[in-house]
């Protein structure tokens, strides 16, 4: 059944400070986001996945995440300005390619190769690009899955083996998602998860932390600018904390980064130009930026199990960390093999020749050869910084700055296959008259500055 999304001036869930920049919290009329009884003139007002719901939403909210941040998925509004003073970034909208920094889920309608396939927006669509279960791995885990793929399958209620919808469990926030507290259980939930009475389980399949439960409290605790986030501590019973979520870049606890905030709301949440853009944090210290954190085993991703019981690092009673507090480390929670330079997918080596077997991430751009020429920031090839920036910089520093996952990909989706920032078919070796012309094409050629030019034209 086709979903109907309704847009009103009274409905929104604010992602960050609206109308007036504030150091902390949000500004806007309370009724923009809240309803006391889910009732106006005798009719329900709550919007769940864009459809009016007689069932109320937790925290007295008018909208769930999708109804707020994909409020008008075919309209051209990428930042929804509410009459009450609230502004809401739209992760799915029409209007061409003028998108927020995270990209646009709208490109995934009918084409799963262009977006992250979250079930919240695309339930039932993934048979268009499901592939064969043998190609997806034994448990249908994400492409380039972490080395311990066999722990993340149907038996652990993370991803499924259904060939038609191999990622039907992937969601926006919480367990099996990206934003908010990424722990599997809600505090106090219990259940005999594995059917073995001899084990002490605290995982209830119907009580996973997803959606609003994963980001609750973060909107009112949010603030602009740099987020010097820390992971949940090993020795803390911390199933969820709204302030810690707000302290994370883009509501991802443990992720450092700087969100563009130049005092206006026309540029917020966007990468505008070389002088105005988000700044991403990278970490190349130790093995894949993990030192001094665990560099092997479950501890790469999972923080020590909390007081709920069960095994010490099991997925159903632990909270995911962001390895190295970096963007590439965050992506590695699901796509670990894509980051590995080792033949065995375990962050080990580059082969006998030293040539990379997979494109490196959180890797310092060499200050030599063709790479030394990448010195002016290109939005089609963003870089990660080894320190937390507090303002946008138009300069790239080879030998210091790093290539990362978002150097090539959009977080939500793009107009190009594989969620790329650029047209991969335009990345052509030897097809340009000179280096400046090739480098202006951006993408791969922003870093690999000589590859687009024949030797006699360099």
Image (cartoon, helix red, strand yellow):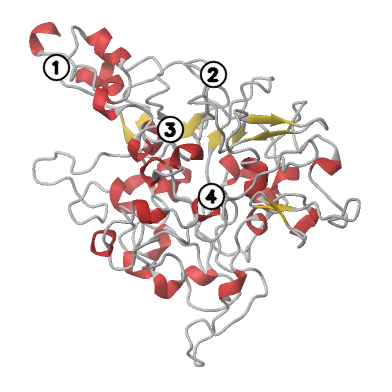
The structure residue drawn at horizontal position 26% and vertical position 9%, both measured from the top left corner, is: 437
Identify whether 131 is placed above or below 90. below
Query: Which labelled disc corresponds to residue 430?
Result: 1
Give the SS element for disc 2. Answer: loop
Identify whether 55 is placed above or below 416. below
The structure residue drawn at horizontal position 33% and vertical position 60%, both measured from the top left corner, is: 296
Q: CA distance from mark 2 to mark 3?
A: 19 Å
Marks 3/4 in contact by CB < 8 Å: the verdict is no
Q: Position of residue 330 (x, y in %)?
A: 45, 47
Upstream in sequence: badge 1 or badge 2: 2
Judged by depth in the image, the label closer to the viewer, 2 or 3, is 2
Q: CA distance from mark 1 to mark 3?
A: 33 Å
Q: Position of residue 194 (x, y in %)?
A: 47, 83
Q: Position of residue 4 (x, y in %)?
A: 64, 47
Upstream in sequence: badge 1 or badge 3: 3
Q: Residue extending furthest front? A: 1
Residue that numbered label 4 is attached to: 121
Q: Is residue 207 left or right of residue 28?
A: left
Q: Is residue 51 left or right of residue 329?
A: right
Q: CA distance from mark 3 to mark 4?
A: 34 Å
């Amino acid at each position: 059944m086709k979903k109907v999304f309704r847009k009103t001036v009274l409905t929104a869930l604010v992602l960050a400070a609206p109308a007036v920049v504030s150091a902390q919290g949000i500004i806007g009329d309370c009724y923009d986001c809240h309803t006391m009884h889910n009732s106006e003139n005798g009719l329900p007002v709550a919007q769940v996945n864009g459809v009016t719901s007689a069932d109320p939403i937790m925290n007295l909210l008018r909208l769930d995440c999708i109804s707020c941040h994909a409020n008008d998925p075919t309209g051209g509004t990428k930042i929804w300005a509410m009459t009450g003073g609230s502004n809401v970034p739209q992760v799915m909208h029409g209007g061409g390619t003028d998108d927020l920094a995270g990209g646009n889920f709208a490109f995934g309608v009918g084409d799963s190769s262009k977006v992250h396939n979250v079930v919240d927006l695309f339930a039932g669509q993934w048979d268009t690009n499901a592939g064969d279960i043998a190609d997806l791995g034994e448990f249908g885990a994400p492409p380039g899955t972490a080395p311990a793929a066999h722990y993340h399958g149907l038996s652990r209620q993370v991803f499924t083996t259904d060939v038609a919808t191999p990622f039907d469990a992937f969601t926006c926030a919480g367990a099996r998602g990206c934003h908010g507290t990424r722990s599997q259980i809600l505090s106090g939930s219990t259940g005999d998860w594995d059917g073995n009475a001899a084990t002490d389980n605290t995982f209830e399949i119907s009580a996973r932390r997803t959606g609003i439960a994963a980001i609750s409290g973060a909107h009112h605790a949010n603030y602009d600018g740099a987020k010097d986030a820390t992971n949940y501590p090993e020795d803390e019973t911390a199933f969820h904390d709204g302030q810690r979520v707000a302290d994370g870049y883009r509501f991802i606890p443990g992720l450092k980064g700087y969100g563009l905030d130049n005092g206006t709301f026309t540029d917020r949440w966007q990468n505008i130009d070389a002088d105005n853009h988000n700044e991403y944090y990278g970490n190349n210290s130790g093995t894949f930026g993990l030192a001094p954190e665990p560099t092997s085993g479950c501890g790469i991703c999972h923080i020590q199990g909390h007081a709920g019981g069960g095994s010490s690092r099991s997925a159903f009673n632990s909270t995911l960390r962001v390895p190295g507090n970096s963007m590439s480390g965050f992506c590695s929670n699901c796509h670990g093999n894509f980051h590995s330079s080792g033949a065995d997918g375990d962050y080990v080596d580059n082969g006998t020749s030293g040539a990379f077997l997979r494109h490196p991430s959180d890797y310092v751009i060499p200050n030599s050869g063709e790479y030394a020429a990448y010195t002016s920031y290109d939005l089609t090839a963003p870089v990660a910084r080894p320190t937390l920036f507090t303002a946008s910089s138009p300069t790239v520093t080879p030998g210091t700055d790093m290539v990362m996952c978002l150097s090539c990909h959009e977080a939500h989706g793009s107009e190009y296959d594989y969620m790329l920032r650029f047209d991969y078919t335009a990345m052509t070796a030897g097809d340009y008259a000179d280096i400046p012309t090739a480098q202006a094409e951006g993408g791969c050629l922003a870093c690999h500055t000589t590859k687009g030019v024949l030797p006699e034209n360099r």
